[in-house]
Amino acid sequence: MTLHVETAGERLDAYLARTVENLTRSAVQKLIDEGCVLRNGKAAKKNEKLNPGDEITLTIPEPKEVDIAPTEMALDIVYEDEDVLVINKPKGLVVHPAAGHSDDTLVNGLLFAKGDQLSGINGELRPGIVHRIDKDTSGLLAVAKNDFAHRMLASQLKDHTMARTYEAIVCGSFREDGGTVNAPIGRHPSDRKKMCVTERNSKNAVTHWEVVARYRGYTHVRCRLETGRTHQIRVHMAHIGHPILGDAVYGHKKPELGQSSQCLHAGALCFQHPRDQRPVMVFAPLPEYFTQVIEKLERMG
């Protein structure tokens, strides 16, 4: 694809994201880094300022062949059409292959069930996966069945119009009935596997929360993500002094109420359908591990 610039001063990545349909700015930057964008015949940089008459050549490579073994597994598909499906992921299931998990992930199961019906935008590691949830977080996850749907859903994630709501049991009690945590999140300076609230090399992060029920020493809260940073709810709840029950990484190190992993469930997902922009609202009931915790809390008084 060849484009001719008419105005001056716009950054290359911003220009391409604005000009090329269904191409996000982050996708543009990745293409630039991979040498797929030329400016006047030479390799370009994403922050270059354009001049009238510049010729921009954009090459979008074909998706890489997926080298992941399809694995038969039970998948709880709660919504599906020709463009999108939504999975209710159980606690303990890894989303995509990583060290120690090469054939037992959600992606392996999706490849067995849906084969070549998944988008290829994310290459060989995350075919079809639009966004992620942690291994020990249960709940709803959107999967794109073609590249068009993937770009449209990714765009909604970027502009915060995809609504994701989580249920959590957190430690401690709140005086307020709700609030907002607006605190940037970045990589932990000494533990690269963790995230933290920091001003250094961070991205803005906003979580809205409300109290659902109060118990002795614990609170059931509902959290709505405005942004989608890694471990965002876990980090933000810990940051305000209310770590998620069972979260040994960001909260109490010893198991409580029988929970050795975070009590966090993605219970609602709302988005505009990629084809006709109609609202799609999907809900997943609280899983058994979560209701068992509530029953224990109710018995505690």
Image (cartoon, rainbow, N blue to C red):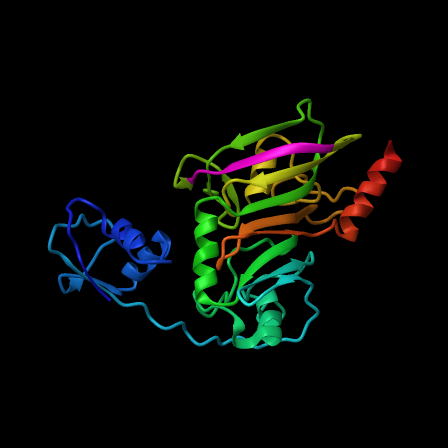
Q: Which of 239 and 125 is in front in this view?
A: 125
Q: Is residue 246 left or right of residue 121?
A: right
Q: In this view, does 243 lie to the left or right of 196?
A: right
Q: Which of 3 and 209 is in front in this view?
A: 3
Classify the position of the C terminus by image quarter: top right
Q: Nearer the viewer, residue 187 or 177?
A: 177
Residue at 66 percent across and 59 percent down: it is: 89
Residue 301 vertical position relative to residue 41 in the rendered view, above or below: above
Residue 111 vertical position relative to residue 4 in the rendered view, above or below: below
Residue 96, quarter of the rendered image: bottom right
The percent coordinates of residue 199 (x first, y second) are: 41, 34
Dominant SS type (magenta): strand
Q: How many numbered marks, from 0 up?
A: 0
Task: Using the rendered image of the protein, determine whether residue 41 is visible from the camera's viewpoint.
Answer: yes
Most extreme residue toward the top is: 175
The percent coordinates of residue 204 (x first, y second) are: 44, 38
Q: In this view, does 170 lie to the left or right of 156?
A: right
Residue at 54 percent across and 32 percent down: it is: 181
Classify the position of the N terminus by image quarter: bottom left
Residue 270 vertical position relative to residue 226 in the rendered view, above or below: below
The percent coordinates of residue 82 (x first, y second) are: 55, 68
Residue at 18 percent across and 48 percent down: it is: 49
Magenta-drawn segment: 203-212
Inspect the magenta stretch and tell me whether residue 210 lies in it. Answer: yes
Task: Using the rendered image of the protein, determine whether residue 258 is visible from the camera's viewpoint.
Answer: no
Inspect the magenta stretch and tell me whether residue 46 lies in it. Answer: no
The percent coordinates of residue 34 (x first, y second) are: 30, 64
